[in-house]
Image (cartoon, helix red, strand yellow):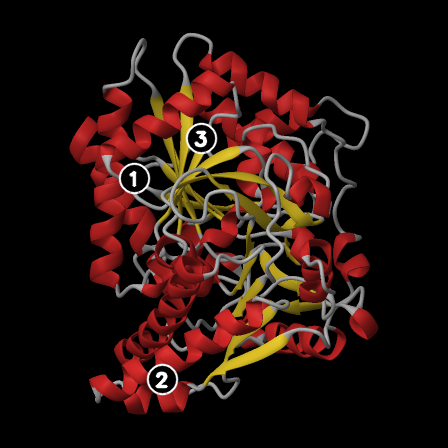
Amino acid sequence: MPLEADVLAAFPAEVQIPAELVADAVAASSAASPRVLVVLDDDPTGTQSVADLPVLTRWDVADFTWAYNHIRENKTKPAVYVLTNTRSLDPAEAAARNEEIVRNALAAAGATEGEQLRLGFVSRSDSTLRGHYPLEPDVIAATVAAVSGEKTDGVVIIPAFPDAGRVTIGGVHYMRGTGADAGKLTPVAETEFAKDASFGFANSEMAKYVEEKSQGRFAADSVIVLDLNIIRAAGPDGDPQISAKAIADAIDSATDSTPIVADIVSENDLRALSLGLEEAERRGKKLLYRVGPPFVRARIGQEIRTELSGEEAYAGNTPSEAGGLIVVGSHVGVTTRQLKALTEQHSAARIVEIDVEKLLAAETETDNAATYLDETVDEVVAALRSGDVIVHTSRLLIRTDDVTESLRIARTVSAAVVAVVNRTLKTFPPRFVIAKGGITSSDVAAHGLEIRHAIVRGPMLPGIVSLWEPVDGPAKGIPYIVFAGNVGDDQSLADVTRKLSNTF
């Protein structure tokens, strides 16, 4: 594993850029014609880097109208998140959902009171390179062209997530080490995430990753690479507009959805890139974005929100005296370690396991499946009356080489988790809900808690783990914590639970 300091030694120091500088540039470009970024988030964890933005789990025209009105009336930053959950869908379903969302977003923008909104589209996906790429940006570009006639010049691919240890240097995407490995970089293709049953990959060099995933449609040498020499062209004490011009110049040749990748190590790098992209779009370039969580924050010029306290999490609502519900579905190593730390430290919590093997066996026998879920719900509700409850799927991951079968198993398990949460909510509402894992947190939000519209309040830990405030439905007033499976250290789940619990 290379050392980060050694890899960075070949490049200039970062340029210090205040978020306000990006915000001013965005405001200037929107002065004559307001612009909103529509973020198609393939699981809900993409909201962990932003604050005070609307989130939709449904995407009818009326839902977008609500979001656009919220942005205008509350003068929030110009972005709305749409929870697509496409990482849990097969390619055909993912494509259809992306198209429907883009069409409805554009229709609502055309019907907005006053001047018509201009929309930019962001395909938010995983910082460890899992997801439907290049399918999703392809569909967004094709749909925009079909509806408006506007062709996409470039697709900007920025998976970096420095807060969670994902950085791109010299065109290579890495994971930073922690603990004894702090300071070391592991190419992401050498991590467990690259072995994902549905979205595995072999290349850490971003240009080669693009070639691999596009099956050669985009050759590696056709990818525009913005390395740190370009991102940091101004130097630490220089004018950020120097970097902005260098970035815009470098992508001037982009046409017909040319892939563009960039080195990112820090928030300043993201802000420098944002200024360059703003300049490129001012010159007329039409861009789509395929990104990790923090890109949108930098692109709209939002300051980094400090982590919320327990008191802030309940602001404006009276917390229930019931216990909280912690739901764990992710199977990545860090989640299993976090679950172990929580169960060891939170001795007052009741632990309820959903046995996946038993669930799949019962799936073929309706009565058995119903009885199993009935018993699980009864156990959870009884335990909530006296304290927190940790509901987790069994840790033995059932693997199959069949991608379709992998998704089917994931859906079966998720449906059971959702049923337990929904029936619990309507029987004895918990004090708070934490959902651990991307697909888990998506399904719990949209179906378990029946959230249609929510506001992202901010992060529960620095730069990661978002708190949603549901604004409608049966979960209104209950803090909902969206916790990605692959972020945080071993103590993070316990730390968030401790903030919200009245028994920990």
In this view, the residue in front, 106 or 206, is 106
Mark sitting on residue 252: 3
Residue corresponding to mark 2: 372
Mark 1 and mark 3 in contact? Answer it, CB < 8 Å.
no
Can residue 388 be seen? yes
Residue corresponding to mark 1: 256
- In the displayed structure, would residue 185 be above or below residue 456? below
Q: Image point 70% across, 37% down: which residue?
A: 268
**Image coordinates for residue 47, horizontal then vertical, percent:** 52, 46
Amino acid at the residue labelled 1? Asp
Amino acid at the residue labelled 3? Asp
How many numbered tags mark residues here?
Answer: 3
Q: Image point 69% across, 33% down: which residue?
A: 233
In this view, the residue in front, 399 or 312, is 312
Element type at mark 3: loop
Q: Quadrant of the C terminus?
A: bottom right
In this view, the residue in front, 142 or 298, is 298
Quadrant in which residue 67 is drawn: top left
